[in-house]
Image (cartoon, rainbow, N blue to C red):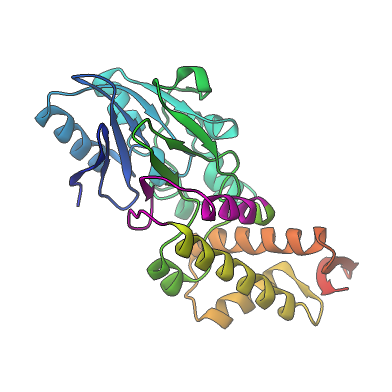
Amino acid sequence: MYELIQASGCSYYIESPAKIGLVKNGDDEVCLIDSGSDKDASRKVRQILDANSWKLKAIYNTHSNADHIGGNSYLQKQTGCRVFAPGIECCFTRYPVLEPSFLYGGFPAKDLRHKFLMASESDAEYLKPDVLPSGFEMIPLPGHFFNMVGFRTSDDVVYLADSLSSRETLEKYTVSFIYDVQAYLYTLERVRNMSAKLFVPSHAAATEDISPLAEYNISKVNEIADVIYDICSEPAASDDVIRKVFKHYGMVINMQQYVLVGSTVRSYLSWLKDTGRLEAIAEDGMILWGKI
């Protein structure tokens, strides 16, 4: 873990729970793509930088989930590097309490205000193409989160952030977090048709051919949508749908899983409604979801 692996030329990644990209911009200057989950992860990154006499100039965050921005604060304080994040993700990076608040839908209890859902604040700037190193291409990858992006380097290495999950992850947890189902499917289709020298997803093995994994992710999204649609054969409130999804897949509920899976199920319900498969029924002080 935290091994530096050369992808191609000046493009590297650090093997970690959420892979960290590292790209050399010259003899001794580098930038990072994401920064890991917390101070401990960023200390290991700092050790790699020091061992190679590299100066960290910037961190380009793909999105604002805590496991991707958790090292920002420490590395920024230690190196003076700039931090960039795209669109709404920049606001979440500057004010990380927004993530658990968004997931819960209100002020988050202490059980949700921890490093896995709420990183330390960092002084992030808006990520725009003109702040990227020469040869970098920013790739919009919406769906998993608000304005998530990936990057293609001049070495033709593509960093895919959380645009897909590994087979092992999906087989173990089944329901991966999705903010916008329609956008996520669009992103998966785009990724499925991409070519590159090497793809580096944050939560799956690096590969030269991403198409099979993208297709598997698409199939899982459609499977979960069908399960939720069938659950709504009898009109059900959101929490009842969430409960039945947990039961269907044999998942164990706790506060963190409740907000992550719950938020995702609500996103599926919105998508199924917007695509004309479900309707929202106001009844007895509740909103019930039922088939049309």
Q: Residue at x 37, y 58 (%)?
A: 204
Q: Could you tell me residue 203's position as x and y percent?
A: 38, 55
**Residue 160 versus residue 263 in the image, above or below:** above
In the rendered structure, the answer to whether residue 232 lies left or right of residue 282 reads left
In the rendered structure, the answer to whether residue 24 lies left or right of residue 233 reads left
Quadrant of the snapshot with the C terminus: bottom right
| Residue 208 lies in the magenta-colored region | yes
Q: Residue at x 83, y 74 (%)?
A: 290
**Residue 55 versus residue 155 in the image, above or below:** above
Q: Nearer the viewer, residue 142 or 74?
A: 142
Tell me the quarter of the picture where residue 188 sits: bottom right
Q: How many marks?
A: 0
**Residue 188 versus residue 80 in the image, above or below:** below
Q: Which of 11 and 4 is in front in this view?
A: 11
**Residue 180 versus residue 4 in the image, above or below:** below
| Residue 17 lies in the magenta-colored region | no
Is residue 179 at least partly visible in the picture? no
Q: Residue at x 79, y 82 (%)?
A: 233
Q: Could you tell me residue 193's position as x and y percent?
A: 54, 52
**Residues rendered magenta in the picture:** 183-209
Q: Could you tell me residue 48's position as x and y percent?
A: 16, 35
User: Residue lying farthest left?
Assistant: 51
Q: Which of 241 and 36 is in front in this view?
A: 36
Is residue 283 at least partly visible in the picture? yes
Tell me the quarter of the picture where residue 41 sits: top left
Q: Could you tell me residue 148's position as x and y percent?
A: 54, 40
